[in-house]
Image: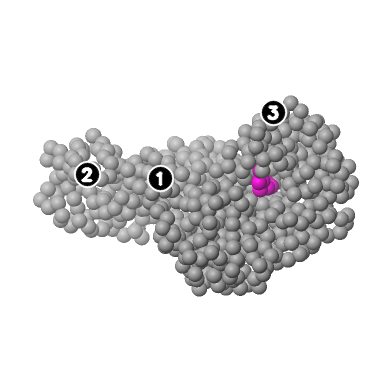
Amino acid sequence: MLKLALITKAAIYFSAFKLLPIFLIFNASTGSNISVVELVRSQAQKISVDGGVSAYAIIEDSFFLSKDIVKNNTDLKNIETQLYAMSFLNANKNFIQPIGEFKKNIYSNFSKELVTGNLFNWSAWYKEVNQNGGGIVVDQKQTQLLIASNNLKEKIQKIQKIKNRIAPNLSGKFLLKDGLFINYAKIFIYQSLNGLKVSEAKINYKKASFYFKNLVPGGYIVAKLKSISGELIGFSEVHTKKILSPLVLNIRDVSGGLKGMSLSSKPLWEKSLYGLKSKINSNFYVESLNRKILKSNNLYRDINLSNSSDYLLGSYDSKHWPSLYFGNTFGINSLYSFSKSMITSVLYLLNFNIKKSRRPAIVFGRVSYNGKPVAGAKLKIYGSKIKPAYFDNWIPSKDLLKTSKSGLFAFVGLSSGVSSIVVESSKHSYNTKFVPIKNGKVSFIDFIESKNKPKQILSYDLFSKNFVPAKIKLLGSDKATVILKNKAVNILQQNNGENLQLFEVEAKNSDYQQLSTISFSNKNQLEIPMIRKSWVNMMSNGIKFITGSSILIGVNQKPEKFSANIKSLLESPYYFENNLVYFDKKSQIYKTPNLNTIGFIAFNLPAGIYSANLVKRENSSLKTTTKLVISEPKSVQVFKF
């Protein structure tokens, strides 16, 4: 936390370690015009002398705490950012000095005593760490107008009183409520006076903030969230007389198209692994869209995501390592969270030096049967030489070669991407499981016994819609199952719980292309549009194939306008969408979609994991469908959306 004081030369009689008034900075990164500082006391240190004018400052540590305070909502978002340098803008010569070098003289021709009600400017350059794990942005400048106060309860009144002294500029944040998110939509924030738009704000989507310059007195601040087709999705309005600092515009859903998503994050530690009851407050992100899922009335909502979507989901909490999970909109999505202290302890016991390398990717898991942990199971990852660590209760042991009575295991130091993990057990059967892996993230997989369960599988010709006899095999299984017309197929699946599955499909008629497709074990029906080899060859005419790549085909079945994009996940190679084309029922190819297109083909998709994101109109509103794609060399993958 940054604590700071400046005094005039009258303070020269104080010694360098005398107790002096200093100030605690609040709301320093909210983008508001004014923040409040509370008068407190601490030791001061003399840091510069220039022409008899003394400036004192107290830096108690190198972090700076900012809080977004929303009226009537205890929504405190703590962001710790490394302070890099600071400057007092009222100085004739602004002094800028990196932290840690305050022993050197910092020259300034201006210093000002701060008392209750006094205004001053403060500015800093600092390193900002993106909260959702997206990397580091350095040398960000933060400027604030501060007011000193003896009583924080007076802060709103004081801000209102001095509002007229400030230039008519306004900045603030917008908060999407009811699960609204930006995907292919735009936000418009403007001032309305007597029904006319008199000024429009500049929008910063990355920081969810806006800025007005030269507002006129009176009127309303209006915020509108509109879809790509111009439909009004979200709305907010506040009269300028009722503006408080910091200003937060709560944009509410007005589309009437809400759909709930069942999400929860549970801590994982000793004695709470089985029979979990506690929950933690996490931020959830659909990594497939780079979008945060917002909470409303204890339910995570998303009006844009269709009910047939699957995606990569991330959970973030300040006290836990980030977690990754393959989820979907047609089932319960529960993530396990691991405290930082627990991860540190496990890495220490495994002699993993986190200081000499990047934060590793970690996969935790357990093997169970009838709800009880299974001992004596071995685990391995396809294509990797990394061996798992097995746990003696909650302590990893290098002496163990199989699971103990705890059933727990962990893989540490895996490469980013998606891996398939298999269980070898003499007593029970388990499906191969796919798990998302990324440096600095932890994933949890639960191996539950697999049993034959019915799954309705429909294999039909893409264009004629006629049934196509075929065999289907779950990746990792040696046994193929024949698909029967109008009859469910029994496939080895988890008795309960979700499991991402990759199927290989081979038609009885060799004229058809061998395909792969993804499904989830909690989805009881799978549709597979079968495609002839001659059609694939015709569509790929003139395409120069890249070694190790694959083909992805998405089928909509009915003609309508939609757009498709493919996003790389977990550090997979970027996909260049100039290799993506659309097609209609007559197999005509288009570079852009139109009202006749029924699907798309993505050629030369590199090996890795991706999200195919499709936006189309559904019941007079736009819906997004996200589909996970595991690209394997020389494969052809198909899905229906």
Classify mark 1: residues with Cα within 10 Å, few (<14), some (14-19) or many (20+).
some
Q: Amino acid at mark 3?
A: Lys
Instruction: Decide which of 459, 283 is in the foreground and name it.
Output: 459
Q: Which residue is mark 3?
A: 544
Q: Which residue is mark 1?
A: 128
Q: Is residue 318 left or right of residue 252?
A: left
Residue at the far left in the pictured view: 13
Residue at 22% x, 57% y: name it: 42
How far is disc 2 from disc 1 in space, using C-alphas?
Answer: 21 Å
How far is disc 3 from disc 2 in space, using C-alphas?
Answer: 61 Å
Q: Which residue is mark 2?
A: 102
In this rendering, the answer to whether 497 lies above or below 581 is below
At numbered mark 1, what does the secondary structure look like: helix, strand or loop?
Answer: strand
In x, y percent, where is residue 529?
Answer: 80, 45
Q: Is tag 3's residue or tag 2's residue first in the polypeptide sequence?
A: 2
In x, y percent, where is residue 103?
Answer: 19, 44
Q: Is tag 2's residue or tag 1's residue first in the polypeptide sequence?
A: 2
Residues in magenta?
624-631
In this rendering, the answer to whether 453 lies above or below 175 is below
Q: Quadrant of the N terminus?
A: bottom left
The answer, for residue 243, to whether it is visible in the render is no
In x, y percent, where is residue 20?
Answer: 19, 55
Residue at the far top in the pictured view: 542
Q: Amino acid at mark 1?
A: Glu
